[in-house]
Image: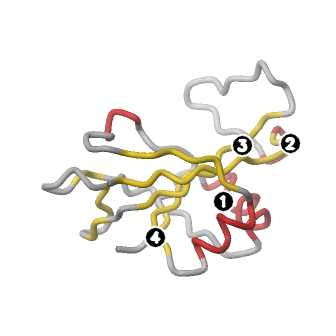
């Protein structure tokens, strides 16, 4: 099972034991270098996260599903790990409006999480 990469993961999809761990950029890179599938669905920030990771992140609007054992499934393959890389905005009170995409200029940094499904 390869790793999934996205900017968020829906907590409603956690239907089996899952550990969420904050990881460093270096740890995220190391995990993703082993191969990953991207469900990065925001075309406007895919370049910024690719620059942050120093690796190409494909833009892909397909959604994650759950397999019969409640592991995340994407493109017909099941996964035990999801790397979530989310932006930290320059304005701590910022919340994107519905239907409005965030620009890379509104992002000051990123934080990484590893979701491990057991």
**Front in this rendered view, residue 71 or 108:** 71
Q: Dots 4 and 3: beta carbons under 8 Å?
A: no
Q: Residues within 10 Å of mark 3 (few under 14, many from 20)?
A: many
Residue sitting at x 82%, y 38%:
106
Q: Dots 1 and 3: beta carbons under 8 Å?
A: no
Q: Is residue 100 left or right of residue 106?
A: left
Which label lies toward us, 1 or 3? 3
The residue wearing badge 2 is 108
The residue wearing badge 1 is 46
Residue sitting at x 68%, y 23%:
95
Tell me, for residue 2, which label it has, or none.
Answer: none
Q: Measured from the top left, where is residue 59 in percent x and y?
A: 55, 63
Tell me, for residue 87, which label it has, or none.
Answer: 3
Q: Residues within 10 Å of mark 2 (few under 14, many from 20)?
A: few
Residue sitting at x 65%, y 74%:
30
Q: Dots 4 and 1: beta carbons under 8 Å?
A: no
Secondary structure, mark 3, is strand
Q: Is residue 40 above or below residue 16?
A: below
Q: Dots 3 and 2: beta carbons under 8 Å?
A: no
Which label lies toward us, 2 or 1? 2
**Front in this rendered view, residue 75 or 24:** 24
Tell me, for residue 37, which label it has, or none.
Answer: 4
Q: Image quarter for residue 105? A: top right
Task: Give the spatial CA distance, label 3 vs label 2.
Answer: 8 Å
N-terminal label among 2 and 1: 1
Task: Give the spatial CA distance, label 2 vs label 4.
Answer: 25 Å
């Amino acid at each position: 099972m390869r790793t999934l990469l996205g900017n968020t993961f829906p907590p409603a999809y956690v239907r089996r034991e899952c550990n969420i761990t904050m990881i460093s950029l270096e740890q995220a890179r190391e995990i993703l270098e082993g191969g990953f599938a991207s469900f990065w669905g925001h075309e406007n920030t895919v370049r910024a996260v690719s620059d942050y990771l120093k690796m190409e992140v494909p833009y892909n609007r397909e959604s994650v599903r759950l397999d019969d054992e409640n592991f995340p499934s994407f493109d017909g393959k099941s996964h035990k790990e999801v790397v979530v890389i989310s932006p930290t905005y320059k304005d701590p009170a910022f919340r994107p409006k519905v239907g409005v995409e965030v620009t890379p200029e509104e992002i000051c940094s990123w934080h990484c999480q590893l979701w491990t499904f057991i």
